[in-house]
Amino acid sequence: PASFKYGPLRYVQFRILEELFHLVERGDGISILGMPTNTSERLRWLHDGDLLKLSATNLDAVVDNYEYFLWLYHISQHLHKTNGFNEMSFDVEEVQERLRSLFSLLSQP
């Protein structure tokens, strides 16, 4: 099951890719050599290189939300693999709040 993979996780990953495209388009001379493959580390790498226009607090919020959804995704994968479950319980209000937070933080240019 795709679970949270094709929602919040891909949203964050595609926003990173979109920002990289904009940097290349502007001719900022960005080199992706040495860029981490882990998404959370990649966000921090971009931020540390002043390539991501987020405050440190907002970056921490994006990473925290991303890792929360990654955690839920791993739980759903485990439940599916071990028990064949295609559904799982989660805190709907927390998921909605975190989705709003991610969209708000990453929809800024």
Image (spheres, rainbow, N blue to C red):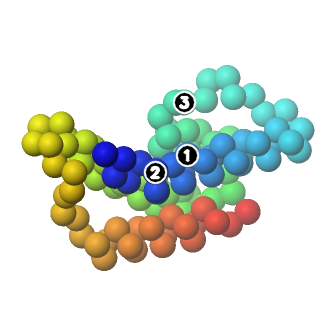
Q: Above or below — where is 30 with respect to 60?
A: above
Residue annotated with mark 3: 36
Residue 26 shows up from this direction: yes
Residue annotated with mark 1: 13
Disc 3 is placed on an element classified as loop
Disc 1 is placed on an element classified as helix
Question: Residue 6 has which mark?
Answer: 2
Query: What is the quadrant of the N terminus in the image?
Result: top left
Q: Above or below — where is 87 with respect to 18?
A: below
Query: Which is more N-terminal, label 1 or label 3?
Result: 1
Query: Which is more N-terminal, label 2 or label 3?
Result: 2
Task: Residue 27 in the image: state x and y as whole percent.
Answer: 89, 38
- Name the quadrant containing residue 65: bottom left
Q: Is residue 59 left or right of residue 99?
A: right
Q: Is residue 58 left or right of residue 31?
A: left
Residue located at (21% from left, 56% from top): 87
Disc 2 is placed on an element classified as helix
Q: Label 3 to label 2, Cα distance in Å?
A: 21 Å
Q: Label 3 to label 1, Cα distance in Å?
A: 13 Å
Q: Above or below — where is 36 with respect to 108?
A: above
Residue located at (48% from left, 72% from top): 100
Task: Residue 23 in the image: state x and y as whole percent.
Answer: 80, 43
What amino acid is found at the position of numbered circle 1 in the picture? Gln
Q: Please name whichever residue, 84 or 78, is drawn nearer the observer in this view of the structure.
A: 84
Query: What is the quadrant of the C terminus in the image?
Result: bottom right
What amino acid is found at the position of numbered circle 2 in the picture? Tyr
Q: Is residue 22 left or right of residue 89?
A: right
What amino acid is found at the position of numbered circle 3 in the picture? Pro
Residue located at (12% from left, 37% from top): 82
Task: Residue 49 in the image: state x and y as whole percent.
Answer: 68, 41
